[in-house]
Image (cartoon, rainbow, N blue to C red):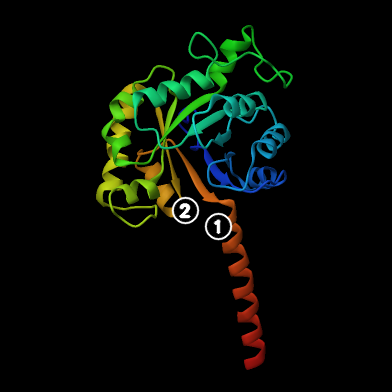
Amino acid sequence: MKRAAPGELAPVLYHQTVASFSMPEWAVAAGYDGVILDLQHGELGLEAACGILRSIPRDNAYAYARVGSLDPAPILRLLDSGARGIVAPTVESRSQAEALVAATKYPPAGNRSLGPSRPALYPGDSYTGAGNRAVSAVAQIETRAGVDRAEEIVSTPGLDSVYIGPADLAVSHGLPGRGDWEDGPVREAIAHLREVTAAHGVTLGIYSGRPEYAAGLLADGLVDYVGLGIDLVLLNRAFGDTIAGLDSARSARSNS
C-alpha cells in the first residue's frame, strides 16, 4: 500500500464477506479501488477466496485478504492466487508482525515459498523482488495492547501498513463496539498511530462505516486509505431503503 501522490485520491476499499465473484467488479465500477476479502469473520472459505482473487485483474493493487490467523499455509495460497495485501488481525507484538512479514514476503525479507501458480503475477527482472514490492504486509491494530506496542510493531522490517480496527479497539477500552469515533481513546489512538507510522514510512488505514467520517479523516491527513463499508451491511441498507421507499410510495397513493 503506497501513499497517494499529490493530487491523487486516497484508495477506498470495502470488506467482502460472501462468496461472490461479481461483487468486486460492481464495486470497482461504482468507484471503489479494491476489496478486503474477509476470511476472519465472513462466510468466505479459502477456496472461494482464492477463486475470487483469480477473477480480479492482476493489475488491481488493492485485492486484499484478511486472514483469521498467522498460519502461513492459507496466506501462501491467497498470495499465489493474486492477493496484493494480507491483513493480519489483532497484531499486538513485534513477533506477530515478524511472522506476518515472514509469511508474506519472499527471501531475504521473509520465508514465502516460490511457487508461481498465476502467470505474469509479478512482472519484472526479478520475480521475487517484484513480488515483495507488489504485496503489502498489513498489521491490524485493534486493541489497547497493540496501540501500546505500536512502536515495536510498526518498526518491524518489511511491514508495509497498519490497519485500525476501531470497533474492537473500542471494546478493549470498555466502550461499545462501534467505529467512527470523534473523540475519546479510539480517536487518540488514531492520532498516535498516525505519528508512529509516519515516522517509520508505513501507511495507515482504518475501517469506517460512514462516508463523511472517512472523508474527515482523509482530509485531516490522519489515514492514507479507508475500508468503507461491509457488503452485507451495504446490502442491508439498500434493502431497507428500497422497502422504505415502497412503503412511502404506497402511503402517498393511499392518501391521494
- x, y (%) of residue 28? 64, 43
Q: Is 134 above or below relative to 48? A: above
Residues packed near mark 2 inside 10 Å, few (<14), some (14 to 19) or many (20 plus): some
Marker disc for residue 233: 1
For badge 1, the amino acid type reads Val
| Cα separation between marks 2 and 1 | 9 Å
Q: Nearer the viewer, mark 2 or mark 1?
A: 1
Query: Can you identify the residue that label 2 sits on?
Result: 209
Quadrant position of residue 133? top right
- Is disc 2 placed on a helix, strand or loop? loop
Q: Is residue 178 left or right of residue 77?
A: left
Give 32 or 208, whichever is nearer the viewer.
208
Give 175 or 183, whichever is nearer the viewer.
175
Q: Is 16 above or below relative to 254? A: above
Q: Is residue 15 left or right of residue 202?
A: right
Looking at the image, the residue that sits furthest to the bottom is 255
